[in-house]
Amino acid sequence: MSTRLTFLILSGPTKEYIDPVRYISNESSGKMGKALAQAVLEKDHKVIFVSGHVNVLPKNVKLIKVVSALEMLEAVKANLKKSDVIISAAAVADYRPAKICKHKIKKSYSTSYETIELKRNPDIVKYCADHKTNQIVVGFALETCDILKNAKLKLKKKNLDLIIANGKESFGSDSATVHVISADGILKMRNKNKKIIARKIINETIRIFQNIKVDKKIS
């Protein structure tokens, strides 16, 4: 029997609060993250699942719920060394408010609240790639233009082993059109159910992981 691998899967959106009731976020549903976890479990591997707030969650995983990008990063740091494969399917907010108002911002407040100063969030998938040892790191690239070009740049710039490029129409949908991009080439999957896409992604990650192990033994 092959060795059981541990997959660290990041899923769902992050929320970056402006005040106690308002926040910066996006429309990520977490459906792809859940599908990835289920595909891993089908192969009898283990899953550590770090998720922002979503209505769909996988069962039979180690579940870690987070709110913000900083919380997600802390969860990643705590579990990175325990994982063989890291897949960042989360829609992490690129920015957060530099200051969070302690009370709900009222219209009667000073005009200084009409401008929100933003601070860049840490790049979580790049952190994973920068700190990987014998692991592989998989990222997602949601683009609204030049999908392939931007995804290829992200794959190289962030030192990822695999990247999945898709458009904004995949948000909240049960299906998607994606490009699975690695050093070996590009596979396009047009309008496929996310469960089918997830199985293909997991098969690819396992193949890449096994090839890395073989290369190390040969060298």
Image (tube, rainbow, N blue to C red):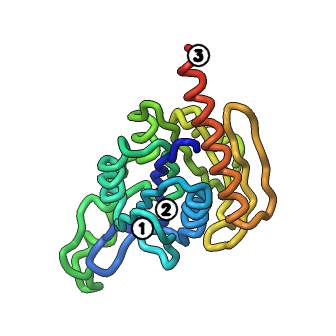
Sooner in the amino-acid sequence: mark 3 or mark 1: 1
Extreme residue toward the left, this view: 102
> Between 70 and 54, which is closer to the camera in this rendering?
54
In this rendering, position of residue 96 left or right of residue 196: left
In this rendering, position of residue 205 left or right of residue 46: right
Task: Check contact, mark 3 vs mark 2: CB within 8 A.
Answer: no
- Find numbered disc 3 in the image and state the secondary structure of the residue it sits on: helix
Task: Check contact, mark 2 vs mark 1: CB within 8 A.
Answer: yes
Distance of mark 3 from mark 1, alpha carbons?
41 Å
Q: Nearer the viewer, mark 3 or mark 1?
A: 3
Which quarter of the rendering shows the N terminus? top right
Q: Is residue 171 above or below residue 132?
A: below
Coordinates of residue 110 in the picture (x, y in percent): 22, 76
Coordinates of residue 61 in the picture (x, y in percent): 45, 64
Could one spot residue 93 in this view of the protein? no
Say how many tags the image has: 3
The residue at which mark 1 appears reads as 52
Distance of mark 2 from mark 1, alpha carbons?
6 Å
What mark, if any, has residue 218 been given in the picture? 3
Residue at x 58% of width, y 32% of height: 156
The amino acid pointed to by label 2 is Ser
Label 1 neighbour load within 10 Å: few <14, some 14-19, many 20+: many
